Image (cartoon, coloured by chain):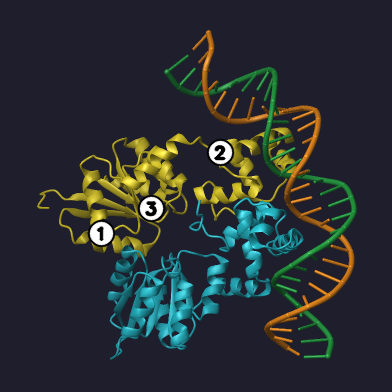
Chain colours: A yellow, B cyan, C orange, D green
DNA sequence: CGCTCTATTACCCTACCGAGCAAAGCATTG
DNA sequence: CAATGCTTTGCTCGGTAGGGTAATAGAGCG
């Protein structure tokens, strides 16, 4: 609490309201100082270089560059960067992606003040911060096979209402191949048909609401 | 600005961070005073009765009782309640539902401080606050036919990967009837098949990520 | 250098889907 | 009262989906 050198923190969130709220909360703690802010992933990288904060607190869902990509970019330059995710998203894809990218912690936005502050302090010490329930989910996810790049393209075709033949034409492969991918997708997502597969795609974060391009 | 009686405002959001951020922003304006806060829709109704605020600023997605339901409950008791929605959700269903429930405005969370403050002042005067682009979307939505209750039940069956026969059994109706509903759904959602219909259901907010019950 | 996973193609076959067409009862609304 | 929309049921039929099974080739890993 009475640290001579306060923890230098950077906030990254596209919502000004959230940044101000976090700043207001963290202001109450003398051992933490907000030294930089960014509104998207691209800005986050630039600001990180300039401010060289001890800890980064950032959202996943952001315009321009997503939080996951931003982590990858920062960690690529500074492997020991201490980045915490603070987000509303509890999608499998985001949680798993965050830690694979090199995040040191994942906090849900309905967490209490104390939890956030504690996470920042733990991250600053170089340790990982993660709740038991999230750790359990991560362990469970590690067992499950990933959806491949190609399969994701097929899944996106299904989402758009394309038939197997249509998908085969857009991807320039045989319809048989598409069927094989569909079969693999149904198995991995434990779905009875393509409608359920699309639903699970949304639930897991493989498919997103934004890129509808309708 | 130099009003003798400040606007008495209530904040409703399940995220403490957001409430604190809003409070921090609104504090800067002397004509606005935060007199109450609530963390969910049910609490909002109770607090509204106690505090009788001039204007309410609330989120849509909340536990226990959603923002839309909360508006309905408050407006049912106090028809001239001035309620503004402040949310990240730009789903058709939420926007349309909000105004049908009696909201006076709809602000996206990436709005600037000034926009939020302005909306509060306009609502306090008794007027409606809505941006042009949202108004256009509302007009467009008014043209489109609603998905009926029954159709939504069928759509939820599709989301779960049920066949038409399975759906007919769970709803205790003929399979022919289910097929008729499916046809209506595909037409209304402009979808080629059930997979796309499920996708559009998520995009429009008819289907939600939370109630997966898997 | 095998093992595993992915991508690719292929065949068969059954069950299911969705289009087209029709109609009747009921509630609501203009 | 006519119009509209929802709910319900029915029929036919071609196309599609998805299960089962199998094989080849390349990438990555231990």
Q: Quadrant of residue A172?
A: top right
Q: Quadrant of residue B142?
A: bottom right
Label 3 vs 1, first from the N-terminus: 3
Labelled pair 3, 1 in contact (Cβ < 8 Å): no
**In the image shown, does A159 or B1 lie closer to the viewer?**
A159
Question: Is residue A76 visible to us here?
Answer: yes
Q: Residue at x 64, y 52 (%)?
A: B162
Label 1 vs 2, first from the N-terminus: 1
Q: Residue at x 59, y 38 (%)?
A: A187
Q: Position of residue C28 (x, y in %)?
A: 68, 83
Query: Which residue is tagged 2?
Result: A188
Q: Position of residue A125 (x, y in %)?
A: 20, 42
The crowding category of the residue bearing disc 2, from other C-alpha atoms within 10 Å (few below 14, some 14 to 19, many at least 20), is some
Question: Is residue A101 visible to us here?
Answer: no
Helix, strand or loop at label 3? It is: loop
Residue A113: image tag: 1
Label 2 vs 3, first from the N-terminus: 3
Q: Are marks 3 and 1 on the same chain?
A: yes
Query: Which residue is tagged 3?
Result: A59
């Amino acid at each position: 609490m009475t640290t001579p050198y306060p923890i230098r923190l950077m906030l990254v969130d596209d919502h000004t309201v959230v940044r101000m709220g976090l700043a207001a909360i963290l202001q109450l703690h003398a051992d933490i100082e907000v030294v930089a802010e960014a509104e998207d992933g691209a800005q986050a990288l630039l600001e990180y270089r300039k401010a060289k904060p001890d800890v980064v607190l950032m959202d996943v869902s952001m315009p321009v560059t997503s939080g996951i990509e931003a982590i990858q970019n920062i960690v690529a330059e500074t492997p020991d960067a201490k980045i915490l995710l603070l987000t509303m998203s509890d999608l499998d894809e985001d949680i798993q992606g965050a830690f694979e990218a090199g995040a040191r912690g994942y906090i849900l936005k309905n967490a209490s003040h104390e939890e956030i502050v504690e996470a920042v302090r733990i991250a600053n010490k170089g340790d990982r911060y993660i709740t038991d329930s999230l750790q359990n989910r991560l362990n469970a996810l590690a067992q499950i096979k990933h959806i491949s790049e190609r399969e994701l393209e097929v899944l996106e075709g299904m989402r758009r209402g394309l038939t197997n033949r249509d998908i085969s034409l857009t991807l320039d492969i045989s319809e048989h191949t598409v069927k094989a991918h569909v079969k693999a997708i149904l198995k991995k997502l434990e779905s009875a048909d393509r409608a359920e597969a699309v639903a699970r795609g949304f639930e897991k974060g493989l498919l997103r609401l934004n890129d509808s391009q309708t």
